């Protein structure tokens, strides 16, 4: 299916790896010009080069700390300058540390809030006028299934990410009809973070090998496997496209059927 994204411009935050990278890849292969960002300059350049190999649109990258509002402002400015405008914003962020309530101090809460919520707010504030001037303006926020069903040990993610869903639902009504705003809720997907988790458990003897770890993580998933990053990226591309022109204010689980409601 042609998603009619040729020549559109997209900014994907936290996109040097994982779900942000997969989303940027899907958009770039559909013909969009894509700006990547991340804090690690070497990894970011590797991501840009990898994306450029299969992209039909232009791929650029700029080092950015999305917890710094000045960095975020510069990121949006560079994107608009590079591509002549901005049509699609995809927000992503790495996960905060795994922790319990009694292990978490006040600073941890503030850092998680800046990472997961304020990074979206700052990006959206800077991108809004450009999206409004676009004929195709969309925002897609990558969050987590934990906004619907808390996961053990993920106190900060469980608690703070829900603010993004409230933001999405509210601005989807405020910005319509010019800008559509949606969210995706990834479940267990084979990102670098999951790979590290499984490999650490193999080293501790919890699993005999990596494949056993993946099978264990898939135990309760009706599809009987964990997801691949590109499976989420493709949905982000669809939501950004005119093919989803009547989809607004929704949160789409991409979890193989794990959520029960």
Image (cartoon, grey):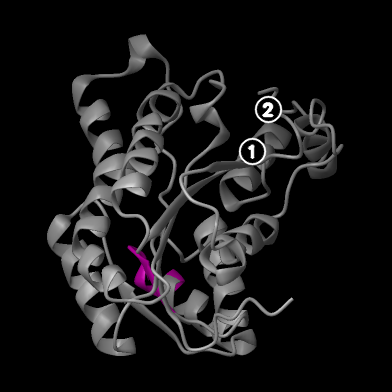
Residue at far left of view:
70
Q: Position of residue 192 (x, y in %)?
A: 59, 52
Label disc, if present, on residue 259 of the rendered structure: 2
Is 223 in the magenta? Answer: no
Q: CA distance from mark 2 to mark 1?
A: 9 Å
The picture places residue 145, in percent across and down from the top left corner, at 57, 33
Q: Pointer 2: residues within 10 angstroms few (<14), some, or many (20+)?
A: some
Which residue occupies the foreground of this view, 200 or 17?
17
First to last magenta residue range: 34-43
Residue under the image location 24 percent in, 80 percent down: 78
Please give the label number shown on residue 112: none
On the image, which quarter does residue 169 sit in? top left
Disc 2 is placed on an element classified as: loop
In the image, 173 versus 141, the foreground residue is 173
Helix, strand or loop at disc 1? Answer: loop
Judge from the rendering whether residue 71 lies leftward or rightward of residue 222; answer left or right: left
Q: Position of residue 98 (x, y in %)?
A: 46, 28
Q: Is residue 141 visible?
A: no
Q: Residue at x 70, y 57 (%)?
A: 231
Evaluate if marks 2 and 1 touch, with contact meaning CB atoms under 8 Å apart. Answer: yes
- Residue 212: percent from left, percent from top: 84, 36
Q: Quadrant of residue 137?
A: bottom left
């Amino acid at each position: 299916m042609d998603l009619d994204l040729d020549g559109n411009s997209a900014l994907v935050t936290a996109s040097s790896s994982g779900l942000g990278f997969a989303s940027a890849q899907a958009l770039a292969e559909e013909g969009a010009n894509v700006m990547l960002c991340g804090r690690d300059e070497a990894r970011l350049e590797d991501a840009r080069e990898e994306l450029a190999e299969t992209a039909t649109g232009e791929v650029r990258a700029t080092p950015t700390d999305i917890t710094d509002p000045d960095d975020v402002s510069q990121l949006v400015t560079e994107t608009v300058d590079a591509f002549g405008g901005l049509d699609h914003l995809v927000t992503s962020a790495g996960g905060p540390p795994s922790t319990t309530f009694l292990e978490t101090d006040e600073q941890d809460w503030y850092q998680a809030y800046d990472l997961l919520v304020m990074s979206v707010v700052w990006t959206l504030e800077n991108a809004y006028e450009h999206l409004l001037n676009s004929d195709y303006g969309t925002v897609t926020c990558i969050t987590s299934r934990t906004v619907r069903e808390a996961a053990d040990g993920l106190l900060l993610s469980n608690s703070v990410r829900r603010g993004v869903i409230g933001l999405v639902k509210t601005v989807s009504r405020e910005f319509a009809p010019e800008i559509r705003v949606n969210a995706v809720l990834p479940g267990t997907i084979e990102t670098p973070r999951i790979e590290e988790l499984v490999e650490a458990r193999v080293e501790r003897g919890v699993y005999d090998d990596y494949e056993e770890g993946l099978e264990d993580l898939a135990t309760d998933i009706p599809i009987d496997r964990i997801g691949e990053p590109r499976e989420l990226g493709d949905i982000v591309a669809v939501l950004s496209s005119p093919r989803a022109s009547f989809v607004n204010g929704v949160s789409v689980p991409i979890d193989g059927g794990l959520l029960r409601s």
